[in-house]
Amino acid sequence: MLFFSRWKTFFIIGLVALGIIFAAPNAMKPETRANLPGFMQKTINLGLDLQGGAHMLLEVDLSSVLQQALVNERTGILTELRDSNLRADTIRITNGIVVGKMRRAEDQAAALDIVRALSVPVDPSQIGSPKTTIVTPVGNDGFSVEITAAQIEFIRKRTIDQSIEVLRDRIDPSGTTEMTLVREGDDRILLQVPGAKNIDEIKAAINKTANLSFHLVHGDSNNERALRQAMETFDPVTGEARLASIGTRYFPNEDGAGGLIVEESTRITGECLENSSPGVDPDRGNPIVNFKFNFRCSRLFGEMTARNIGRPFAVVLDGQIITAPNIRSAITGGRGYIEGSFTPDSASELSRLLNAGALPAKLLIVEERTVSAELGEASIRAGQVASVIGLLGVAIFMWLSYGLRFGTIAVLALATNIALIAAALTILGATLTLPGIAGIILTIGMAVDANVLIFERIREETYNGRPPVNAIETGYRRSLAPILDANITTMIAAITLYFVGSGPVRGFAVTLAIGIVTSVFTAVVFARLLTATWLRGTRPKTLPI
């Protein structure tokens, strides 16, 4: 137990040295760190409560998503009826219900069968899952379609989950900010961005939905009367307008001057994008956004353009037409570019948003707070003072209980333990919060437990008449099992806190888990190396313990 080969000694000392090297930048000033090598400039990520930042509570506008679900139902019904050669007089959305009326009463039964077939289980993986819609006959020639409560709940959960993922990709594409994004209640999202300096950029990322779609321009756009009626009745809130043809939709131009009537049904949306990037039009020199479709949509886009050469198609972004070029030839490569009134910055921003994905719904900021960095500095100072007091208190206790030599070994192991915790947090990029500081302080008290067990066992073996080398070796060997048992049970608690908890609770669990690992290493391995080195150098006849 007390023999260390040369390579083991080098490994232990090297590991401790690396820990001190990676922990040291956290105690340096920024201007000093700037002169260090790149790998040594990294420091611990501080949480919102320590370095300040943005705190926002977002409300998901589910009404727009439910409205779009109704529009999709209406579009699907129109397509199926058209493919079955059944003619509808009107199919409209009224008070959250799709209401249809057939031109001939004798077609009602066939139409009901088709519409009911469109209602599928909310969760196909579950047997007996409720349907997505309720279909009811109306009079002798019509029907109504209402989305079920189970489908509404499914849409609600999916929308919030998708919003969280898109926000994460938009605000923290590199994954280094350690922000908090969690669901709050039924329709809200809690967003915390530590160290955020430009709140307006975060708001811009939240407010931009980036819904992209490609639509063929309908012939009614050339009908002055139909176009004027659509423009005059267009509601910018709901996106609805009075249209002359079923299966069409009106979108205004980006500059607000006019708009176009397009075919509502499309399978070419932002989900088709494999990637996008800002660029420059080689002919005109204007900023553009290049895009590449995935394989499936490349084929669909190629088929659409091949069948509609000479027709214009509209590129719609967030309910506005940004460009509507004519199709000159089939576009089969799956690549293209979007041109509009872009600046280099806006083209880069749009490309970033498209790569992150479209938000499925608008997000409303219902609560906004900016946490001052000064409050965080006060918390850090308080944590530092508490850590120093805790360390001094433990050191005095160990010196008084086990003498200067063994007490010093325990203090060195404890100081090394704190350095290794700081190094681990730095390397892993974990976020340190105020509860995390509490976890470190708790670790200071817990870490010395192993030394107490070992030293008490050594003292007991000495009282039993064992010589110094034998007493120390037996003390370390027989203390190992209870030390591991105690730390494994604490580790189970830390892991449970991490997976069950969120936010600050996770921060506490992370520092506690790291502290458990490092404390076992410093108490059982590093302190034993120090003890063995002292023993070989002094060869005492009695132990001062």
Image: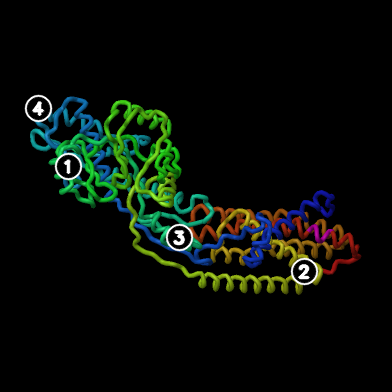
User: Which residue is labeled 2 in the image?
Assistant: 407
Would you say 498 lies left or right of 216 here? Answer: right
Mark pair 2, 3: CA separation: 43 Å
Where, by quadrant of the figure, is residue 485 drawn?
bottom right
Q: In this view, does 469 lie above or below 358?
A: below
User: Which residue is labeled 4 in the image?
Assistant: 106
Q: Which mark identifies residue 247?
A: none
Give whichever of 29, 382 is nearer the camera: 29
Would you say 215 lies left or right of 345 here? Answer: left
Would you say 416 lies left or right of 312 here? Answer: right
- Kindly report the secondary structure that dominates the magenta region of the rendered protein: helix
**Mark 4 or mark 2, whichever is nearer to me:** 4
Looking at the image, tell me whether mark 4 or mark 2 is earlier in sequence order.
4
Mark 2 touches mark 3? (CB < 8 Å): no
Where, by quadrant of the figure, is residue 222 drawn?
top left
Which residue is depicted at the point 8% across and 30% down? Answer: 105
Mark 1 touches mark 3? (CB < 8 Å): no
Question: From which residue to which does the magenta span run?
Answer: 528-532
Where, by quadrant of the figure, is residue 323 drawn?
top left
Mark pair 1, 3: CA separation: 45 Å
Give whichever of 254, 246 is nearer the camera: 254
